[in-house]
Each structure stands twice: as structure tokens, then as C-alpha cells.
Image (spheres, helix red, strand yellow):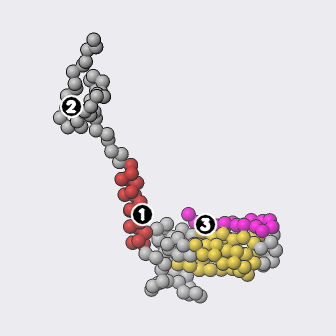
Amino acid sequence: MTQQSPPVAPQQGDPPLPSGPYQPPAGYTLTKKKRKKWPWVLGGIAALIVIISVAGGGGHTGPGAAAPGAPATASDTTYEVTAEGGGTAMVTYTSDDSFNISQENGVALPWTKTVDLGSGIFGGGASLQAQGDGSTDSITCRVMRDGEVVSENTSTGQFVVVTCSNF
């Protein structure tokens, strides 16, 4: 005859032991499973990003927005794309303080565009990319702020691509 061990009494605060013919081994105590905190932390960070994005607003179209041909202000960024001998290019650039991207296809070179990037979520970061149409051997991009060049690159080759940014 086998000897049965006495049932283990749960401690105060422990969940009750299961009932039925299958009992846990002697000395076994059930413990509460710790809840993971990382989903809550991750959710809080995501909520904070959404709140900051909404507080930053959308495109800047009110007073102080850059008008075409208007002189540059402190928050304006000027993009410039040039190529030896001219030609055309596809140009992609950061277009506003919400980090939206705009693209212009088949623009005649040299090309210049001034946009108001403000400070925005990304601190007024500017990004410019240009791809030549195959008729130029080299292409140069520039990002300028307050009249100073903050990024400049040149690439060579057929259907050349060049990128400038100030992140």
C-alpha cells in the first residue's frame, strides 16, 4: 500500500490549489504569475509620441509660412540641385515641419526650393535626394539654412543618385 502525502495547505494570498484526482506533489505551492510591465511601458511611449505629434500640428500654413519667392526666415531651408550641363532630375525632399516628403519629377536643373521646416518633431531635419535622367555625368545637392551650407554631396555616373541631409 502506498502512503499518501498530506495535502499542502495554501498560504495566505496564494491562489487555491486545484481540486480533483490530480494533486500537485508534496511541498508544491502555487505562486502568482508576475505581470509583464514592458507592454505598458511600450504603450506609454507610443502614446507619448502620438501626443507630441498631435501637439506639433500639421503643415505650417498660417502666419509665418514660407510663400513662394519670399525671402528665407530662420526656420526656412533651401534645397539646391545642380548638374554639369543642365538636364532634368527627379527630386525628393522633406517638405514641412511634420516630416512630410514631396517629390517633383522632370525638373530642369539647376533647381532650387525654399521650405519652412520649423523645429517640428525632428528638430527641423532636412533631407534631399535627386536622381539624374541619364543626360548628366554628375549631380550635386545642397541643403542650406540661414544661407550656410549644412550638407553638400556630389555623385557621378549614368542615372546618378545623390543624397543630402542635416540629421
Residue 92, relative to residue 47: is it above or below? below
Q: Is residue 165 magenta?
A: yes
Q: Position of residue 119 (x, y in %)?
A: 47, 71
1 or 2: mark nearer the eye:
2
| Residue 84 in sight | yes
Could you tell me which residue is drawn at 49 percent across and 72 percent down?
98
> How far is the residue under mark 2 from the one under mark 3?
64 Å
> Amino acid under label 3?
Ser
Q: Position of residue 75 (x, y in %)?
A: 50, 76
| Element at label 3 | strand
Identify residue for label 1: 49
Quarter-of-image position of residue 164: bottom right
> Amino acid under label 2?
Pro
| Element at label 1 | helix
> Amino acid under label 1?
Ile
Q: Closest to the observer: 83 or 99?
A: 99
Tell me where the magenta segment starts and ends, as one range. 146-167
2 or 3: mark nearer the eye:
2
Identify residue for label 2: 10
Identify residue for label 3: 165
| Residue 110 in sight | no
Q: Closest to the observer: 124 or 34?
A: 34
Residue 3, relative to residue 131: is it above or below? above
| Element at label 2 | loop
Q: Earlier in the sequence, mark 1 or mark 3?
A: 1
